[in-house]
Image (cartoon, rainbow, N blue to C red):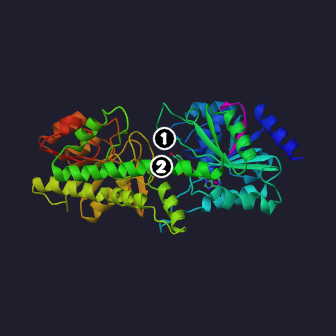
Amino acid sequence: MSETIKQTLLKNIEDRTARVAILGLGYVGLPLAVVFAEAGFHVVGIDPDQRKVTTINRGESHIQDVPGEQVARLVAEGKLQATADFSALQYADAVSICVPTPLRKTGDPDLSFILDATNELAKYMHPGMVIVLESTTYPGTTREILLPKLGDEKGLVVGESFFLGFSPERVDPGRKDWTTINTPKVIGGITPTCSEIAAAWYAQALQKVVPVSSAEVAEMAKLLENTFRMINIGLVNEMALMCNRLGVDVWEVIDAAATKPFGYMKFTPGPGLGGHCIPIDPLYLSWKLRALNYTARFIELASEINTNMPRYVISLIQDGLNQQCKPLRGSRVLVLGVAYKPDVDDLRESPALDVIGLLEQKGADVSYHDPYIPTIQHDGWEQHSVNNHLEAASTADCVVIVTNHSSYDYPTLLEMAETGPILVDTRNAFGVAGKNHAKVFRL
Ligand SMILES: NC(=O)c1ccc[n+]([C@@H]2O[C@H](COP(=O)([O-])OP(=O)(O)OC[C@H]3O[C@@H](n4cnc5c(N)ncnc54)[C@H](O)[C@@H]3O)[C@@H](O)[C@H]2O)c1
C-alpha cells in the first residue's frame, strides 16, 4: 500500500501533474511558487492576506525580486493562482509552508503562523501528500509541532502514507546572481523516504538539491548559516568600536584583511542588524538551548553588540554636531536609507527604526529619505519620506547614511558638506573621500 502511495506520488512529481500549494506568498513563498510554476507544475498560493491574493491574480507582483510580467504570464497560462481559501489544500499533493517566524515582544519564538498554517493544512490532509516546512525555526519544530498534527492526529503514517520534511530558504532579497532557482537547497525528511520524496519534488524545479539525513539537520544547518553571519557581523562591529578607540580606520583594516585569499571572509560593520532573518533566527536557537539548560554564549554576546550599534551611531551624530557647537536637541537630522540593506524595499527589523526612535527621544528634528520606503509605520508613529534627498540635505544640520542605496548622490552630498550639514557615514558610503574629511564622521 505505502509503496503504491510513494510510487504514485513520485510519478506525479516526475510528470509534474502533482498539484503544488504554497502557504504564504511573501518574500520566500512567491519566488518559490513562481519557480515551481515555471517548472511546469500547477501552483496555488494560499495566503490570508487578500491584498496579496488579488495582486497576484491580477498578474502583478508585490515582491521586488519577482517581475510582474512573469507573474502575469504564469497566471494567464493557468500555472499560478492565488487564494485566501485554505480549502484549496484538498486538491494539493505537494505543499510548502513559507509563513513568518518572528519573535514575540518577550524575545521568544512566535510559532503562531506555523501553527495556524499547520492547523489549516491538517483539515485537508489526505494520503499521498508531501509537505515541506521552509520557515526558519528551531531544530525539532518539524517533528515536534507539525508531525503530530499532520500525521498522528489524522491517522496518517509518516514515511508511508504521507511525507514530511524541512528545507531552509536561503533567498537573499535583491540578489541577482544567487536566486531561488540556483541556490543549493538543503532538504531533510522525518524519515529517509520523506527526504527522498521531498528532494525528488524540489529537484524538478531547482538546480541543486542537497538531501540530508533528517529534518533536524536541515533546521540546524539554516541556523548555523545565519548564526555564523550574525556573529561575524557582531565581531566586525566590535572591531569598529575598538578601531575607533585606537584611532585606526576600520574600513582600511577590513580591506587589508580581505586580501588574504584563504581563511578569512569579509564582513562589514554597520548601524545594526536588520531583515527578517539575521537578527531573529539565532534567537530561535538560543531559546531552544535555554530549555536544555545551555546558554548560547556567542549568540548572546553578538546580539548585545549588534543591538547597541544604533546607540553608537547616535553618539557619532552627537560628537559631529558637538564639533559644530550644536546640541542634538533641536538639530535637523536627515536619515538617508531606512531599508535594512541597500536597494531593497524591506524595512523589517531595520536598525534605521532604532536610530530614528533614539534621535526623536533626544529631541532631534528627524526626517528621512528612502526611494523604496515611502512611509514608515512603526510602534504607533508614522513618517513619510521626503521627496528629494539633496534638497532635504541642504537644510539639515546632519545627514546620517544608515543605508547606502546606490541611487544616492554621494559626491554632491560631500560638496554640500563644505558649507552645509555634517555627514555621519555608517556604511563607508563615501569611501576614502570621507576619510580625514572635517565634516564626515565615519563608523
Ligand atoms: N525574507 C527572507 O529573506 C528570508 C530568507 C530566508 C528564510 N526566510 C524565512 O522564511 C519564512 C517566511 O519569510 P518571508 O520573508 O517570506 O515572510 P513574509 O512576511 O514576506 O511572508 C509570509 C507570508 O505568509 C502569510 N501568512 C501568514 N499566516 C499564514 C497562514 N496561516 N497561512 C498561509 N500564509 C500565511 C503572510 O500573509 C505573508 O504573506 C520565515 O520563517 C523567514 O524567517 C526568509
Q: Relative to 169, is 433 above or below?
A: above
The amino acid pointed to by label 1 is Pro
Observer-side mark, 1 or 2, equals 2
Q: Residue at x 23, y 44 (%)?
A: 250
Query: From the viewer's perspective, is 169 left or right of 3?
Result: left
Hey, which quadrant is residue 150 in on the image? Answer: bottom right
Which disc, if any, is residue 173? 1
Label 1 C-beta lies within 8 Å of the nearest ligand 1 atom:
yes
Other-residue count near label 2 (Cα within 10 Å), few / some / many at <14 / 14–19 / ≥20: many
* Viewer-side residue, 404 vs 82: 404
* Residue 55 appears in view: no
Q: Relative to 441, is 101 above or below?
A: below
* Residue 121 appears in view: yes
The residue singled out by tag 2 in the image is 226
Q: CA distance from mark 1 to mark 2?
A: 15 Å
The amino acid pointed to by label 2 is Asn
* Viewer-side residue, 119 vs 139: 139
Q: Residue at x 49, y 47 (%)?
A: 225
- Point out residue 216 in the picture as x, y percentages from the top left corner: 62, 53
Q: Relative to 308, is 168 above or below?
A: above
Q: N-terminal of the two: label 1 or label 2?
A: 1
SS class of the residue under badge 1?
loop
Q: Which residues are magenta?
A: 38-48
Label 1–label 2 contact, CB within 8 A = no
Is 383 a magenta residue? no
